[in-house]
């Protein structure tokens, strides 16, 4: 029996991870038990609470995070408490109870000024409060449990169970004839269901430590992503117009380049994440955006 604890289980990724684990249990592995803990169930910023929650588990997947990127600029202490101290508490607890920790991190740990995909061992150089707190979470978790912490960095997430860029584009499409979207930030749109599947592969593997990039393969801009969403919805992609980041100034700087490399998957005998466009197509076909598409969804094709 593999006993798995998911913290942050009420979020978009946490909910898809529960589904992925349940599906695998039916089709492949029945000998697993999952504890899904929301932030009201477990306060990971409390060391004693974290230790108590981890006890009796073999794998901990930390999906809990302070993700309000702009708000973190004015409240870095609160973000650090969840993203860094919380990760350290879970790592210490995992070391104490002999569990593996999978710590979900972010592309924001990098400066975002590269021109080629960031390798897993690229130096951390965050330029925002959110990025600094997530980078500290990586460092503290690995220091507390060096032989049992796996870091999985992801970015540009979308899915069924939470607010996200793709859903926002569909909502705006119902009210506006044209939209302007930045075309000078590059990244990898990542379906949370696909990331959940990659996390399950790690859980099922004998891997105990390392760094993996859990973004989709390929790359595009927010503008390209928005046009693809319109295409899947059967809408005219020319309604999406390009602009630059100067038109959308925000408190936290956004990485201009958030493309991550995926070599660690193959090096450990695991399949890398699939292409972002194929994933978006399947997400649409699966009805992920049906609640916001307002009937615009065409027949399956």
Image (cartoon, helix red, strand yellow):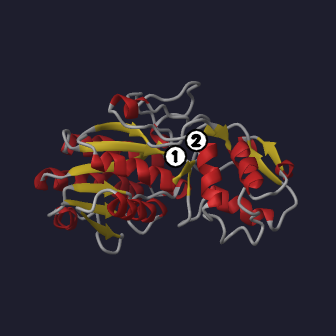
Say if mark 2 contacts mark 1, CB within 8 Å.
yes
Can residue 211 be seen from the camera position used here?
Answer: yes
Report x, y in % for residue 92. Answer: 18, 52
Q: Whole-percent x and y of residue 114?
A: 56, 27
The numbered mark at residue 155 is 1
Looking at the picture, tell me which residue is in the foreground, 272 or 134: 272
Residue 256 vertical position relative to residue 294 in the rendered view, above or below: above
Q: Quadrant of the N terminus?
A: bottom left
- In front: 237, or 90? 237
Residue located 40% across and 62% down the image: 23
Label 2 packing within 10 angstroms: few (<14), some (14-19), many (20+): many
Earlier sequence position, callout 2 versus callout 1? 1
Structural crowding at the residue carrying mark 1, measured as other residues with C-alpha within 10 Å and reported as few (<14), some (14–19) or many (≥20): many
Q: Secondary structure at mark 1?
A: loop
Q: State the separation of the CA atoms marked 2 and 1.
A: 7 Å
Residue 147 got which mark? none
Helix, strand or loop for disc 2 = loop
């Amino acid at each position: 029996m593999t006993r798995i604890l998911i913290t942050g289980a009420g979020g978009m990724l946490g909910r898809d991870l529960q589904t992925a684990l349940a599906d695998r249990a039916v089709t492949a592995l029945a000998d697993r038990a999952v504890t899904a803990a929301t932030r009201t169930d477990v306060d990971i910023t409390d060391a004693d609470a974290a230790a108590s929650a981890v006890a009796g588990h073999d794998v901990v997947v930390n999906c809990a995070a302070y993700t309000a990127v702009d708000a973190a600029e004015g409240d870095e202490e609160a973000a650090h408490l969840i993203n860094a101290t919380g990760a350290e508490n879970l790592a210490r607890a995992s070391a104490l109870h002999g569990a593996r920790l999978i710590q979900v991190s972010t592309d924001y740990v990098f400066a975002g000024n590269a021109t080629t995909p960031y390798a897993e061992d690229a130096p951390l150089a965050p330029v925002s409060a959110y990025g600094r707190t997530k980078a500290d979470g990586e460092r503290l978790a690995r220091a507390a449990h060096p032989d049992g912490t796996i870091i999985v960095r992801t970015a540009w997430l979308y899915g069924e169970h939470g607010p996200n860029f793709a859903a926002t584009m569909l909502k705006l499409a119902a009210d506006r004839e044209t939209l302007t979207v930045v075309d000078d930030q590059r990244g990898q749109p990542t379906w949370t269901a696909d990331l959940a599947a990659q996390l399950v592969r790690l859980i099922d593997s004998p891997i105990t430590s390392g760094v993996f990039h859990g973004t989709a393969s390929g790359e595009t801009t927010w503008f390209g992503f928005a046009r693809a969403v319109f295409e899947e919805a059967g809408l005219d992609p020319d309604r999406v117009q390009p602009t630059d980041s100067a038109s959308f100034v925000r408190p936290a700087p956004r990485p201009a380049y958030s493309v991550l490399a995926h070599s660690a998957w193959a090096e450990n005998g695991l399949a890398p994440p699939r292409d972002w466009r194929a994933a978006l197509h399947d997400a649409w076909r699966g009805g992920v955006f049906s609640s916001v598409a307002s009937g615009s969804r065409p027949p399956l094709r």
